Image: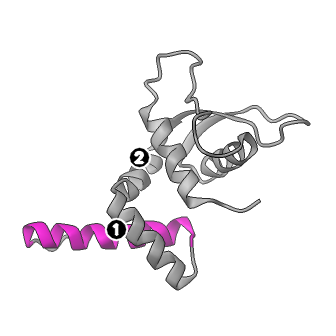
Amino acid sequence: MKRDPDLERQILLAIEAYDGESEPYYADLSDLPASRIQIDYQTRLLSEAGLIWAIDCATKDEPFAMMPVRLTMAGHEYLDSIRDDEVWRRTKTAAQTIGSFSLEALSALARGFIREKIRKHTGIEVDI
């Protein structure tokens, strides 16, 4: 199975939106436009990357099953860099051009577009 950066972003947004107080006491991702196994697989990858904290519920029948509980600080930072739809669109286009969708590449590209946006709107050069 392949990584899906769009689905990963949707998962991060859904986990962030979870209030932490409502049952089922983990972020419900069932409304996302993907199969359960795709969602579970991407959720596991996000957990392995340290972007989310999730409970491992893997079984023989569901080898990728995870219950996502919250974003980590790294998850919040990454999501903040790709949250804006325009920044995300430009980031994906640039990633396709260079041929890399690694988290490091996506994050670096997004930060570059954010720096550009800050400079355009404020005239201030920032190093983020």
Categorize mark 1 by other alpha carbons within 10 Å: few (<14), some (14-19), many (20+). many
Q: Position of residue 33 (x, y in %)?
A: 60, 45
Identity of the amino acid at label 2? His
* x, y percent for residue 58: 80, 36
User: Residue 65's image quarter?
Assistant: top right
Q: In the current view of this chain or complex, which residue is farthest to the bottom?
A: 98
Q: Is residue 33 magenta?
A: no
Residue ranking furthest to the left: 123
The residue to which callout 1 is attached is 111
Up/down of 18 relative to 6, above or below:
above
Distance from disc 1 to disc 2, alpha carbons, whole Å, reads: 14 Å
Q: Quadrant of residue 52?
A: top right
Which residue has dot 2 on it?
Answer: 76
**Whole-percent x, y for residue 1 in the image:** 77, 59
Closer to the camera in the image, 83 or 80: 83
For the point 53% across and 65% down, the residue is 103
Q: Is residue 30 above or below residue 128?
A: above
The colour scheme of the drawn protein is: one colour
Q: Is residue 72 visible?
A: yes
The region drawn magenta spans 101-123
What is the chief secondary structure element of the magenta stretch?
helix
